[in-house]
Image: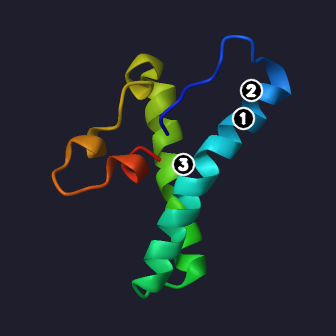
């Protein structure tokens, strides 16, 4: 994700634009995992669990949750998909 939202985006348009921005890297991540041998349902389950955990972390400390993911600091990971 290289570009953030423009300042004039509000409401449903902003949410839709966010979905459009994250769709490509998420799809790439799913495809890569399936090609590596994971079943699609396993990948979906894993992503849902990751999102659930991130939501819990956000609920505990909303300010820290908006910071770049700690995983993006891990050597060898692709920063384009690591923050998802």
Residue 82 image position (x, y, % from top left): 37, 50
- Whole-number angstrom distance, CA of label 1 to CA of label 2: 5 Å
Residue 66 image position (x, y, % from top left): 45, 24
Query: Who's the residue at 58% across and 80% down the image?
Result: 40
- Whole-number angstrom distance, CA of label 3 to CA of label 1: 22 Å
User: Mark 3: which secondary structure?
Assistant: helix
The one of 2 and 74 positioned closer to us in this rendering = 2
Q: Which residue is identified by label 2?
A: 14
Residue 59 image position (x, y, % from top left): 51, 28
The one of 44 and 15 positioned closer to us in this rendering = 15
User: Mark 1: which secondary structure?
Assistant: helix
**In the image, is residue 2 above or below residue 36?**
above
Q: Which residue is identified by label 3?
A: 52
- Whole-number angstrom distance, CA of label 3 to CA of label 2: 22 Å
Q: Which residue is identified by label 1?
A: 17
**Label pair 1/2, CB-CB below 8 angstroms:** yes
User: Mark 2: which secondary structure?
Assistant: helix
């Amino acid at each position: 994700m290289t570009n953030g939202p423009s300042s004039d985006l509000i409401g449903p348009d902003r949410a839709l634009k966010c979905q459009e921005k994250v769709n490509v890297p998420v799809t790439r991540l799913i495809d890569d995992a399936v090609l590596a041998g994971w079943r699609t349902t396993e990948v979906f389950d894993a992503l849902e669990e990751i999102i659930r955990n991130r939501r819990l972390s956000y609920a505990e400390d909303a300010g820290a949750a908006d910071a770049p993911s700690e995983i993006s600091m891990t050597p060898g990971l692709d920063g384009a998909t690591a923050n998802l």
